[in-house]
Image: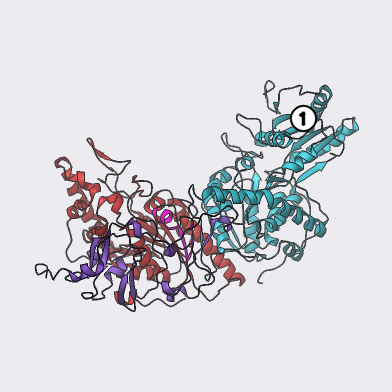
Amino acid sequence: MAKKGWDEFEIGAMLRTFDGKIDNIAATQQEDRAYSQNSSYTASVADWRLIKPVFNKDYCIDCQFCWIYCPDVSIISRDKKLVGVDMDHCKGCGICVEVCPTNPKSLLMFPEQADEESVIANWPKKDEEEA
Amino acid sequence: MAFDKMELKDIEVWDGNYAAAQAMRQAQVDVVAAYPITPSTPIVEGYAKFLADGYIEGEFVMVESEHAAMSACIGAAAAGGRVATATSSQGLALMSETLYQASGMRLPIVLNLVNRALASPLNVNGDHSDMYMIRDSGWIQFDAFCPQEAYDLNLIAFKVSEDHDIRLPAIVNQDGFMTSHTAQGVKTLSDDAAYGFVGEYKPMNDMLDFEHPVTHGVQTEEDWHFEHKARQHNDLMTKVMPKIQTVFKDFEKLTGRKYTPVEKYDMDDADVCVVCLGTSVETAREVATEMRAKGIKAGVIGLRVIRPFPFFEIAEALKNVKAIAALDRSSPNGAAGMLFNEIAGALFNTGTKALLSGFVYGLGGRDLTKAHLVALFNELQANADAGKVTTKLQQFIGVRGPKLAFL
Amino acid sequence: MSEMKNIKNLKEFSTSADRFEGANLLCPGCAHSIIVREVLNATNDDLVLSASTGCLEVCTAVYPYTSWDASWIHIGFENGSTAVAGAETMYKALKKKGRLKQPERTPKFVSFAGDGASYDIGFQWISGCMERGHNIMHIVLDNEVYANTGGQRSSSTPIGSSATTSPEGKKSYGEKINKKDMMTIMAAHGIPYAAQVSPNKWKDMVKKIQHGFAVEGPVFINAVSPCTTEWKFDPKDTMHIADLATDSLVFPLYEIINGQELNITYRPKNVVPVEEYLAAQGRFKHLFKDEYKYLIKEWQDRVDEKWAYLQRREEARV
């Protein structure tokens, strides 16, 4: 966000999360909200990441462990289904992979530069030892 | 509205504390969070009793410290309603952290500060150490010299503080015991007239507006902090004084009682003058009149508004004076004194030839007597006659032992 | 009273619309935000929030960004509880006076603070709020250290932990004083509800938070918040550490109703030795030197004693 001059912002360093009115927020998903430029929703921490989670929906059982334990609101679940990872807000901690119960896991960490299509194509097979 | 109005006589006999409590009742303060401390306690006790008797509809929270009192006031003000409290001395010292937070968040809160000395040694009586301590905290500061003014300035303070162009908290000072516990005749407004003057509270950036969530009390570092502080200072320097002037005028229209940021007494042709605060203003006025009978053209300036400091107004008021005494009722502890410094600053780039001397007096409630002021005016006249300050620049008045003077 | 959000299972819970945002500045793998999400998502009601100075506060409201979708206030280190209590008091006043903008809403007032801001500097403020009966919930994000200022000991720091002001060294095993029992102290205020929670046990957490929201009066919640930075473990292991904390009974999950009715809410099927919990964290690494191994035994004894004590209280209904 551009750095404003002393006369260009609200008094008291007060911030508004939304532009205009928000009604029934608890029933309004993020994509349907009018976030203001002051909400960190509009910011990105993608550059914090050295490794990234890749989601392979073929193995996902929609258990939602990754959703509940994601510290960064980056696991996007809608209608009880895992939709994907919010790569603007994911910091690459890897918790989602650790808590994923499937075999093979439905989420795995890869270097930030890794190509998603090729890592999914080469997804590890079921770990028989663990099974 | 589920509360009873109170029938007041045109003139009631009230002390400063009760006058402030009555003003808080008439302003229909929504939340008072407070912690007792002498000599301010009766103000919040007054509000509690009005609440208990059904003369007000609001909430009173007796918290566990002054720091918590102002913390709760800040939370309540941010939630969106009229908030007031009272404290003194050590209580103010404890809440001082939160005073900066209240003003930085631009939350209107009225604080009745019943001035009292700061320990150590412990002392419950009136001096201005507490007022001076937080003078740079970003609050608007009014000063009442008597119970009537404590009443009037409370009503005025809400109106200034809550204005959406201002949104800065305000302190109403009164002298501990000398004003707070001294009953005098106070001209009252009816409940309707007083509330009509203060007006309904108009929320702004209120946390309880669930359709417009707000974040209060953010962190700003070197990339933003200066701009926010500059904004606050700008508003104090440019917006507050005009607003105070307007509200003073409105109040005069309603009551006939006229207030000005710099209260001048016999200043039109004064050769010598005293600048002071609180009850000392009234004593100095009496003595000045007596000095005039003796041929000394004496005047008095009392500061009605301490912050924002009436820089140009005071320079204008002092421009033709030959000798000025700045009276500080707080130990400067190694400097010249707040009023001395502020006045010197206001006069420095003007063409004045006035001589300025400073006096430290009345610490811990020590009386400032008429005899002290007679001697002081005589000394000022001697300075004026000699064309120079004939004494040291800083003298102590009323302390036992050999005469104490510095600078 | 508003309707309680129906959360039967995790799938249903996952339909929640989060009111806490990413791109905050908390460390990767920080448990604070996991706890915050579980708490905020436990209700559909409006929220009025506060945070005391600390990691959560300093990472979620750095101008010009806020990560909060509900009204939120921060004043200082010690007074977050009182800030939200002030807002709750204004709510009561305006409700009485008929001046609420949305009078049909039933907001919940929640104060978040770290263990430093709760066990230490804010102790008096929280005690005041609990004693006065404000309808607020104070939640401690208990990471047992002043993490925001770089790892100094707090009165929540456990014995043997190496903190920057109680470091392990050639002649010291680190912190010498046992963790303060904040739960019992807060429950002793006679408040309607006090509970210890852990983010790994989300269902237990949600149940307790919902109970806390449902009761009238002050609620105290102590949430263990494994700190990747100061406890010294890999960010991916946050939930694993939380599992060890609850399953070793270092952090037993229980509740105290009205200051006197204690219920244990989680009994691990397989209790993990405390040694495993300690071994997983760098802050206890030095305890595995020969000369300090006795401390691990003492740790286990303390945990066993506490567990026995909790069970005795539960049985005796006190």
Q: Residue at x 72, y 64 (%)?
A: B195
C29 relative to B378 in the view: left or right: left
Q: Position of residue B189 (x, y in %)?
A: 78, 60
Above or below, comparing residue B37 to residue C68 in the picture:
above
Q: Residue at x 59, y 47 (%)?
A: B37
> What residue occupies the far left of the structure in this picture?
A129
Q: Which of C212/B50 is in front? A: C212
Chain letter behind tag 1: B
A14 relative to B308 in the view: left or right: left
State the image quarter where residue C238 is shown.
bottom left
Q: Which of B97/B33 is in front? A: B97
> What amino acid does circle 1 point to?
His
**Mark 1 Cα shell of 10 Å, populated few (<14), some (14-19), many (≥20):** some
State the image quarter where residue A88 is shown.
bottom left
- In what quadrant of the picture does the C terminus of chain C appear? bottom left
The reply to whether residue B17 is visible in this rendering is no
Output the letter for the chain in purple: A
Task: Identify the residue under disc 1.
Answer: B372
Q: Position of residue B244 (x, y in %)?
A: 73, 53
Q: Does the segment drawn in magenta span residue C167?
A: no
Name chain B's colour: cyan
Q: Position of residue C47 (x, y in %)?
A: 47, 68
Look at the image and name its color scheme: by chain
The magenta stretch is: C47-75
Output the letter for the chain in red: C
Mark 1 element type:
helix
Q: Which of B124/B276 is in front? A: B276
The reply to whether residue B338 is visible in this rendering is yes
